[in-house]
């Protein structure tokens, strides 16, 4: 079983009580926040190493680092091979700042996109723009509904009910 499969089984498929589940995720999110605080403090630094080395660097256990890598992978400039990674697989944490911010907004992770380190990366105005861009990209806008007696949108000149509305 790969590290990613182990992480996902432990995090999503294990038979934990609600209290255990809340404790597990609360602890994970706290550790994740700590890693992001360190990463965002030096956003231009290209952090690389094996999965095990990064777990040691950020003082988390191996499974927590695997979960972190799973979460950040879509925000990286070059994706890591998370499906097949082992402890000694070299990985990179070189992230796209705007994409990472938007993904945090999309995940509704306010404890992450609200980190004070973002203020050193983006102005408050730019953060608001990125927030709005992300929110509007997932908003579905329905067109105006065609009424039965309205002219048909196909351009035939007939009423909708006698044309495409049949």
Image (tube, rainbow, N blue to C red):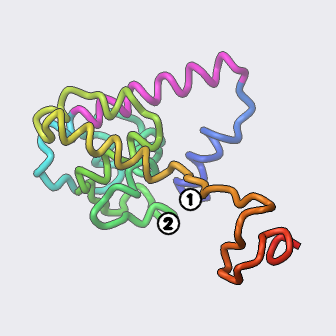
Q: Which residues are magenta?
A: 17-37
* Left or right placement of residue 164 versus residue 90 in this view: right
Residue 107 badge: none
Q: Secondary structure at mark 1?
A: loop
Distance (Cα) linking label 1 and label 2 = 6 Å
Q: Is residue 155 above or below residue 127?
A: below
Mark number for residue 2? 1
Mark 1, residues whose alpha carbon is within 10 Å: few (<14), some, or many (≥20)?
A: few
Badge 1 vs badge 2, beta-carbon distance below 8 Å: yes
Residue 35: say if magenta.
yes
Quadrant occupied by the C terminus: bottom right
Q: Secondary structure at mark 2?
A: loop
Nearer-N-terminus badge (1/2): 1
Where residue 114 sits in the image (x, y, percent)? 30, 28
Residue at the spot 13% in from the left edge and 37% down from the top edge? 123
Residue positioned 37% across, 26% down in the render: 111
Q: Quadrant of residue 135?
A: top left
Instruction: Please report the residue visible at 26 percent of the width from the left and 28 percent of the height from the top.
Output: 115
Relative to 138, residue 163 above or below: below
The quadrant in which residue 22 appears is top right
Q: Which residue is mark 2?
A: 84
Q: Give percent across and percent down for residue 9.
A: 65, 45
Residue 68 placement (x, y as % from top left): 41, 44
Residue 40, by quadrant, is top left
């Amino acid at each position: 079983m790969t590290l990613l499969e182990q992480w996902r089984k432990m995090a999503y498929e294990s038979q934990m009580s609600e209290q255990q589940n809340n404790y597990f995720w609360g602890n994970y999110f706290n550790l994740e926040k700590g890693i992001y605080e360190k990463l965002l403090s030096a956003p231009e630094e290209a952090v690389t190493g094996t999965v095990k080395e990064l777990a040691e660097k950020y003082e988390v256990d191996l499974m927590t680092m695997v979960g972190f890598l799973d979460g950040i992978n879509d925000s990286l400039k070059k994706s890591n091979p998370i499906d097949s990674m082992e402890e000694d697989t070299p990985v990179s944490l070189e992230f796209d700042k705007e994409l990472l911010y938007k993904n945090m907004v999309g995940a509704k992770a306010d404890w992450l996109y609200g980190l004070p380190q973002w203020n050193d990366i983006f102005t408050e105005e730019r953060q608001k723009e990125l927030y709005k861009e992300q929110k509007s990209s997932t908003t579905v806008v329905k067109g105006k509904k065609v009424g039965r007696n309205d002219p048909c949108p196909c351009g035939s000149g007939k009423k909708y009910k006698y044309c495409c509305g049949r």
